[in-house]
Image: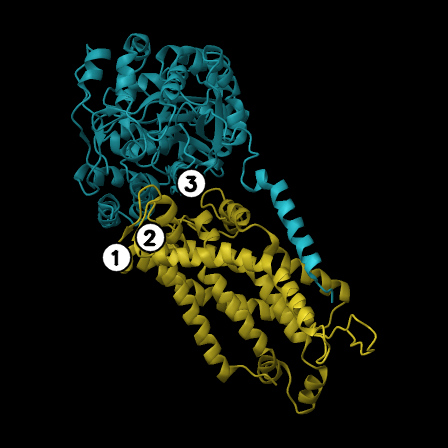
Amino acid sequence: MTTQTTPTTRAVVLPSGVVPAGTPERPRRQRGSRLLIWVFLAPTLIGLGLFSFVPIIGSFVLAFFRWDIISAPEFIGVGNFVDLAANPTVRVSFLNTIGFVVVAVTVQLAVALLLAILVQSRMPEWLRTFFRSALFFPLVLSAASVSLVMAYLFNQEFGLVNEFLGLFGVGNIGWLTTGFGAKVVVLLVYVWQNFGFTFLLFIGGLAAIPREVYEASSLDGAHGWSQFRNVTLPLVSPTMLVASVMAIISALQIFDQPYVLTRGGPGDETRTAVMVIYESAFQQLDFGLASAIGIVLTLLIMLVTAAQFQLSKRFVFYG
Amino acid sequence: MVELNRRATLALLGLGLAGTAVSWPRLSGGDIPGRNEDALTVALFGTAQDAAARQSLVDGFQKLHPDIPVRIIAVQGQDWSNFFAKILTMVAAGTPPDIVSVATEGTQLFAERLAQPIDEYVQRDAADLQEYFDDVNPSLIESFMYKGNLFQLPDNFNAANMYYNTSAFERAGLERPRDDWSVEDFFAVGRTMRDSATGSFLPYFWNNRLWGGVVPWLYVNDTSFLTEEKASGGDWLWSQFYPNEAPRGGGYLWQHADALNERTIESFEVLQQMVGEGIAANPAQGGGNELVSLFSRGSVGMTPAGGFWVQGLNDAGLGNDEYDVTYFPKMRGQRHQFGAGGYAMMQTSQRKDEAWEWMKYCISREGMSIAHQKPDSSLPRRSLNAELYGGDMGPKHWEVFYDTLDRFPTTGPMPAPPQQAAVESALIKNVVSTITSGPTGVRRGLETMQRDLELALKGR
């Protein structure tokens, strides 16, 4: 945008929309521009207010009440928080979620980075384009549909996976009916479906590393693993921070895959925090407890994210 | 950048207001057909197609009651608890339906919180209703009583019977089991089928759920995972409509966890043995969508199902002679499990008299025949089942569906207290670990189940 300075021109507009000082019409135009800003912002602000801030505040308030939708809410102070601390299912679900986040995010970042490096290596452009699209594709699928198909594939008696393993003499594995098997399947399905976005982030991060850096490091004798450890990893670390923050927040909210694949079972082996929120609210009609669990989960997410940014000061290299 | 003067601002605001006014019916949902009309609102658990399929029922009703407009709302849900949550949301939003179709799973929840007892209406129209009760097994009526009051009249039911694939039986050289076959006979049949099969085959496939899961195996052993008592009251109904039977009381009460009684442990050990021997599937969770295809292509020998399955198997291309149905095998007894469905009148309804007329029509011979033109459930009216299953579609021994009630009078509904969702959740989540942890794992698993059931029943 250019700044018009001809005194005879009335529509003098600066990048900020402010008329230069000394112009008699400045206050009126300033008001008009500010109004315009608010008009454009209004839909987003109203939407955010109605559908994000109000529910967040409502959920926070509800956490101190007992409410089953049909009866009047009853104030019980911190009763819901006391109950959730004593509830073994809630405790197990949070431990499951934390364990899942640690493993899933590690695997997701490792797989995404490895594939991004492979795709960025020497290969025909059409093949690179193909891999980029193919590896991103699972992300656009519905998690529920994918999980439903996977449940069929991993069925113990009639699933294709056991059928295939049977060709090599492997007996029927209870993928979804044993604790370890169910956790592995949930992890596989989640990572397969979600690494695509992390992969794209790494593609961008790797593409931003100047080729000269690699050339210089090669001249200094760095190749292969040593080049990856001393050049690639430090330079891609800002991307790693963003990717890990997003991956952790997303993994902490895992719901679809375990809900469709195992309904949290066997026992509570794959029950996650968000599943317990859903079950408390919509199956047991205990909206107060569900809100309290939601608040604890939100605090956990905020805590982990803050810790990540704090740690990033030591581990992230901004060049 | 565009400048916004006062005139333009006013024009934009005017445009926004005009747009809002024009789209107000959509924004407020006022353009939804039937909304805000003075119609009797009936909520069904199902899809828009299910609602459309009820149009003939509405038409039949309106021939008798042209002054009562009816609006059918289909509420989709993954399971009954999901459906109830949506109905409760409608109540909370101030738009409750007048009548809701409620199955056994939700009868006591609705009775406790939302439904209107229909005792007065039934007594008022006793003369008209006598022929209905004469045609209906009292076990079905009893399942809709709660704490001495009647809340619903059954218009469909499904007892958990044993379906078997006749090809799998023939391949194994087996004949139809005796009606009073025992669990030992069941094991013998399962082992023979398992040993004669090639490829992927399971003698017995079952799903981990409240209906048709572990409960039939508990009931045939005269036990359950909850204590079962009867409420007092209800004498008016038994003496009026079933004078030749002993009064059954005022409905079932399931108030305490009972997963650790010796009979329950014994039933779980039987299931554990079935799974361990490869006779039964490791129980899958869910609605058993895959079961129809597995059964119809001969990969499954036996499975628990009710009359509702006849339509599903026919749709899957299975001929009437390719499968059959029998009773569950006997352990200490041969008590069966069933689930029933019917309409419940909402306490909040402003059209209770009209709602009662709808309920009466739906349990009339005409209404029930119109609502169930295909065998998608067994009918509480004994006399209508021959027409439903005895024609073009149905297994050879279709009489088993209703005879289950007549032959085993203690046959009862699945245990579904007002806390049904939490109870079902506690049951389902502990079944797999109880059965798959070896013989020593049964008691350990049931201890956890007992703890979870106590928590579920205690409420908060």
Instruction: For marks 3 and 2, give the one nearer the viewer.
Output: 3
Chain that bears disc 3 = B
**Quick one: which chain is cyan?**
B
Q: Position of residue A224 (x, y in %)?
A: 63, 81
Q: Which residue is mark 2?
A: A288
Which element is circle 1 on? Answer: helix
Pointer 1: what residue? A79
Give a yes or no on whether discs 2 and 1 share a subunit. Answer: yes
Of tags 1 and 3, the one toward the viewer is 3
| Dot placed on the residue nearer the N-terminal end, 2 or 1 | 1
| Residue B337 vertical position relative to residue B25 in the rendered view, above or below | above
**Residue hosting label 3:** B93
Viewer-nearest residue: A195 or B94: B94
Q: Which amino acid, by three-letter code, is at mark 3?
A: Ala
Q: Tell me the amino acid under the disc marked 1.
A: Gly
Mark yes or no: residue B179 visible: no
User: Is residue B5 positioned above or below A143 on the image?
Assistant: below
Which residue is nearer to you in this view: B404 or A76?
A76
